[in-house]
Image (tube, grey):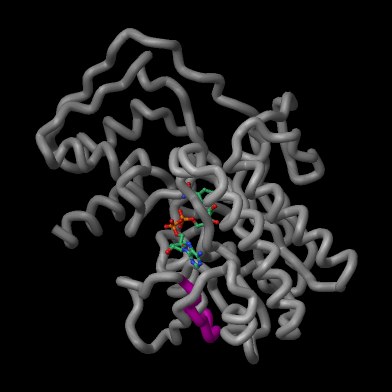
Amino acid sequence: MKVLVTGGSGFIASHVIDHLKAAGHEPVNFDIRPSQWQGEEVPFFEGSITDVDALENAMAGCDAVAHLAAAADVGEVQKDPLWAEELNARGSICVLEAAKRAGVKRVVYASTIWVYQDNKELEINEDVNPALPSHLYTAGKLAGEAYCTSYKALFDLDYTILRFGIPYGPRAREATVLALFCGKILNGEPITLAGGGTQTRRFVYVEDIADAVVRSLAPEGANRIYNLVGTEETSILQVAEKAQELLGDGEVVVTEGRAGDFAGAVISGQRAEDELGWTAATDFAEGARRYVEWRKAQA
Ligand SMILES: NC(=O)c1ccc[n+]([C@@H]2O[C@H](COP(=O)([O-])OP(=O)(O)OC[C@H]3O[C@@H](n4cnc5c(N)ncnc54)[C@H](O)[C@@H]3O)[C@@H](O)[C@H]2O)c1
């Protein structure tokens, strides 16, 4: 299958490109900047997802689109809401419109489990509708989801919505938690955890996410929504301790502060297992080890 990957130079999408190649597909990268992770063997179109003509041109002959380009840093979204809206909402409808015009069969859309952030349920699967959002990041990502289902209803363009858990692993941006803690240790700075770092997260190793994106291209994935979550809850303190253990150094300072935030609902990834045969195969200890290995090799 020929698959256009938007944001293919980014953290998660660069792994999607690797996994598409490994599975025998033909990935094409569409991004505003070239990739530092792939060579010339992956065709590259430099352009913005707000440019429908450029997208349509890049989609020529493609069977599917994996749409991952976005304003993915929640802090940046809060700082510049209009820029984020242009990418996350407008950019997503542009991708769908270009796919419709280019005769692409399916758009796989990268969403996030943060869309459930305002839900009150304690257990959540994909049949639970996300509550109206309190963050502009989730508002933008939900707009993209809504455009996917609307393009299906009005123009019969198939979609797959993937709600990613918290990704980590090689090529992660420095702002992500494991990367940040490793950076502090390597700079000789202490890791400070307000309130003990007891809050937990459902991390997912980035290559497992990439594997799910490839699997979701199967016929079963058409017009379905999947939560892609790991099976373990990992506390921020455990992340700090793992970084310490793997780098053999560093100081963790636990300060008084607000108690750990509400761990949130338990989000089920059962549907992805049942329908796509996907589970998050890499546990946090192994994924963190691979991240640190990669990081050392970059130094
Ligand atoms: N990182 C997370 O914590 C997380 C969690 C859940 C879901 N997601 C989603 O996964 C996707 C990928 O996230 P990431 O963390 O790999 O992000 P990233 O910032 O590493 O990658 C985004 C890519 O999009 C490109 N891009 C930015 N503006 C563009 C434009 N106008 N046109 C074309 N390309 C543009 C960037 O150059 C970059 O290569 C996003 O859709 C994000 O919302 C991320």
Between residue 137 and residue 156, name the one nearer to us.
137
Which of the image's four quarters has the N terminus?
A: bottom right
Residue 20 colored in magenta in the image = no
Q: Is residue 264 above or below residue 168?
A: above
Q: Position of residue 79 (x, y in %)?
A: 46, 39
Q: Relative to residue 6, is residue 62 drawn left or right?
A: right
Q: Residue furthest front?
A: 82
Between residue 187 and residue 74, name the one nearer to us.
74
Between residue 250 and residue 33, name the one nearer to us.
33
Q: Residue at x 40, y 44 (%)?
A: 284
Q: Residue 33, located in which quarter of the rendered image?
A: bottom left
Which of the image's four quarters has the C terminus?
A: bottom left
Question: Which residues, given as a range, are shown in magenta?
Answer: 21-31
Q: Is residue 13 above or below residue 115?
A: below
Q: Residue 158, located in which quarter of the rendered image?
A: bottom right
Q: Relative to residue 91, is residue 29 drawn left or right?
A: left
Q: Position of residue 5 (x, y in %)?
A: 54, 73
Q: Residue furthest bottom?
A: 61
Q: Residue at x 81, y 66 (%)?
A: 151
Q: Position of residue 143 (x, y in %)?
A: 71, 50
